[in-house]
Amino acid sequence: MKTNYLFILLLLMFGNIMAQSYIVDGKTIKLEKSISGKKFVIYSDSLSSLNKNNLQLKNKVLKNEVMDSVTFKNLKTKPIYVGNFYKVPNTNKEVGVSNILYVKIKNQADTILLKQKAKLLNFDIVENNKFMKDWFTISCNEKTGMDALMLTQNIEKSGWASAIEPDFIDNFKLLNCPTNDEFFPNQWNLKNTGQFGGTIGVDINVCNAWEITIGNPNIIIAVIDNGVELTHEDLIANISPVSYDAKTNTQPSVVYQYSPSLQQLNPHGTQVAGIIGATSNNSIGVSGVCKGCKIMSISADFWPTSSLAYMTQQLADGINFAWQNGASVINNSWGRLLPSSIMNNAITNALVNGRNGKGCVVVFASGNDEGDPILYPANFSGSLAFDVLTVGAIDRCGKRKTYPSCTAPFWSSTYGDDLDVMAPGDEIYTTDLMNFEGNSQSNYFNNANGTSFAAPQVAAIAGLILSKYPNLLGGSVREAIMNSCKKTGGYNYATTANKPFGTWHQEMGYGLVDAYAALQAACTTTTINNQIFNNNALYKDCIINVNGSVVNNGINVQMQHITSTELKNGFEVKLGGSLEVKTQP
């Protein structure tokens, strides 16, 4: 059972905190001493045990933070944990260290060792991760005598754990820039006719793609967010019957609030979902990009003051739940400042094991801060075959969204070496929470801003590709999207080391995604002309065409296609030879 803790941020000065570090997949992440000297304090009791007359809320939303400032007087309850704040290198951001840690044992027999270490070092074992059994959640308490980052270093030095890392507070944020309302003629991102002062043709070219496919209900796109309104009038027909709340480990998903103090539901996940899969041709609302696909809602509470944070675990669990429950594509319109092994493991699981080993397509938004590096996990680095798709945002004129630009909203799309592709992210029309609970006075919103709303367009294009070619490997889908981008904006796209999928630019990646071109690029063709096969051979492609060839005695030729294999013009298999033609497994 998870204990219900009260998170309290005490804005007090505590002198200098020495630099600390932790290790993620062999790489040392160094944190600098806190600038403000703030402390993070956890009390074991609920608010009811405290004198409510002495509780004063201040500054309900701190700049660039997600936590309330709380001041207490005359406390009788002693804290069970005091954690430090640390500065993240190369940023002006600070993160607090909660009492939660994640530890990975080397083998199942080490569960006994973990229990022994818990007694020795005075930490609590909270739970064994349900998706990855070699990961455990542990917790500091009043007897541990050190904050979670210091305990992390202690365990790292002892060498008995495979991986160990703390959970940070103030680490995750949704990547939208909130704003307001309705209909397809206004969806410039889908068909840019120059409306709202944009440039004609600067869109994702989905109208032509819809002539090939509008999506298949067997393709499920997971939205890991603050929750999708499952009964929304323009979404309900495309909502998967399977959803998940990663905070409570229950079904169905829920819609979480902006914050406990605001008492307002957050429409972010519903807005993201509408871009992916709002129902089309129903005389209301907007059209989703993959309007024939299903949406799986996975909710997480992005406001960690309401209970124990567990944010890293929530989102890692959400990713694991998604691929284990049939999601083909996973959209993540959020990011954090620091990398994580438990998150890396979850992402790798989806990329490698999803879709019965063909691999999920995992999409992340790059971030909305001009001066910052691309946020983690958008900068997750796997192999060429197993990597995430990192998405930035363009404005209506085809350039990277900056301020000022050809449009007004005050934000800029984050860019850098990890950027893959761009999609529209400026004043996007989409679904909103119904009954006036969202950002608008209707069930639709006309002003969704941020890379949060660029990423789902790319996730939906991946859904279109898999609807047409369901046996494609996840890496092949990702490659098709990058290979087919439009080189908009007047940038100097160039051949770049470690960027093998066409010309690339640091501010634009491979360019603006093109749904129609990506569908065409996804289905490549191998043509074999008048080949005499004297050696065994294996061919794998979307389409295989064989003209006038011969397989000799004792030779085996295998052809594995996604769409079709065509044999013509006198193709022959000699006695004793063999030909195997089948759909790719």
Image (cartoon, rainbow, N blue to C red):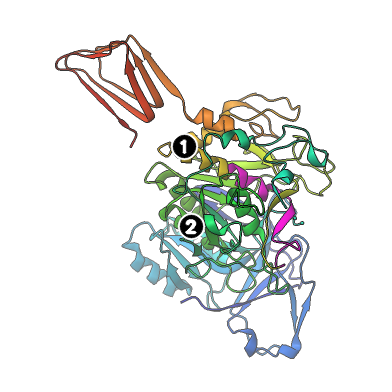
Per the image, the residue denoted by label 1 is 468
Per the image, the residue denoted by label 2 is 240
- Report x, y in % for residue 109: 31, 62
Question: Residue shown at 82%/49% (left/top)?
Answer: 410
Q: Which quarter of the figure has residue 300? A: bottom right
Q: What residue type is labelled 1?
A: Lys
In which quadrant will I find the C terminus?
Answer: top left
- Report x, y in % for residue 418: 62, 39
Q: Element type at marker 2?
A: loop
Q: Element type at marker 1?
A: helix
On the picture, is 497 further left or further right than 403?
A: left
Q: Are marks 1 and 2 in contact (CB under 8 Å)?
A: no
Q: Observer-nearest residue: 240 or 52?
A: 240
Q: Observer-nearest residue: 558 or 27?
A: 558
Magenta stretch in the rendered image: 436-458
Q: Which amino acid does label 2 sit on?
A: Ser
Magenta-drawn stretch contains 55:
no
Magenta-drawn stretch contains 444:
yes
